[in-house]
Image (cartoon, rainbow, N blue to C red):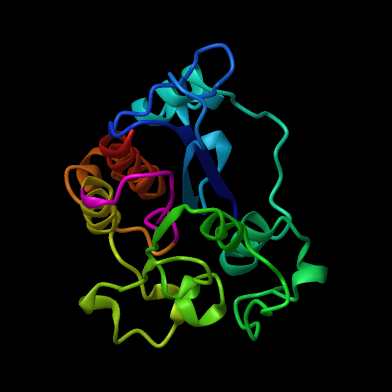
Amino acid sequence: MCLLAVSIWVCGASRRFWLNHSTGVAQTAQARPPSVVLVTLDTVRADHIGCYGYRRIETPSIDQLAREAIRFEQAHAQVPLTLPSHAVILTGTYPMFSGVRDVTSIGLPTTVPTLTEVLRANGYRTAAFVSSFVLNSKWGLARGFEVYDDQTDRETRLNKNPSLLERRGDRTMNRALSWLDSRPNGPFFLWVHLYDPHSPYRPAEPYLSRYAGHLYDGEIAFDDVQLGRLF
């Protein structure tokens, strides 16, 4: 499993996150704590994105962000599974330290602090909108979040495999944008997780038809559109 993570520092109330083209850092008129948006795209391979040279897919939102920010060519996930990989991102620790090594782990120990807890203690408003049961709040990643929206789509809830319990990306983004538009003033930390590129591959139309025979690419293209709504 590969995981594409996008972190954006933002300031001000606009939904459009304007970045400095030379540094990738958001501009601010006054010295104040920056807001942070973390976007994680589950099971996305870098070699299936336009900004990394892939020509079979259209990913204009990600490509534009890559042009305006910093694009890494040597970035590696510490573990190829959704839950422990996100634990790495939110704690800055290796799986052997956090204890979250796979999707059946007992969860993140309370002794391991998270980025969210640190930001919340420093006055940040915090919210997460995740798209898979494998990131359910019971695994410990919800600590520090005022809002942790982990609801899955009703039509997937009868699946016995937890990795198949998911919410489509447009529905997750709808919830995230609703929170963003109504959030209180002050710095915030927003995490949006999209799961569509994870198997099984069943992209919504028109991506199902447009990427027939390459449904994985169709899922990525679908999520790129959702990111365009956020950026």
Quadrant in the picture for residue 222 = top left
Quadrant in the picture for residue 167 = bottom left
Q: In the displayed structure, does residue 206 sit left or right of residue 189?
A: left
Q: In the displayed structure, does residue 74 sit left or right of residue 178?
A: right
Instruction: Evaluate whether residue 86 shows in this view.
Output: yes
Query: Residue 188 magenta-drawn?
Result: yes
Q: In the displayed structure, does residue 142 sit left or right of residue 172?
A: right
Q: Where is residue 196 in the image (x, y as percent from the top left)?
A: 37, 56
Residue furthest to the top in view is: 22
When the figure is inspected, residue 7 is found, relative to residue 21, above or below; the finding is below
Query: Residue 6 magenta-drawn?
Result: no
Q: Tell me the residue at 38%/44% (across/down).
A: 186
Q: Give the range drawn in magenta.
A: 182-198
- Residue toward you, 112 or 209: 112
Quadrant in the picture for residue 153 = bottom left
Residue furthest to the right in view is: 96
Quadrant of the rendering where the C terminus is positioned: top left
Residue furthest to the left in view is: 205
Q: Position of residue 103 (x, y in %)?
A: 60, 76
Instruction: Evaluate whether residue 58 shows in this view.
Output: no
Q: Position of residue 147 (x, y in %)?
A: 36, 66
- Residue toward you, 79 or 35: 35
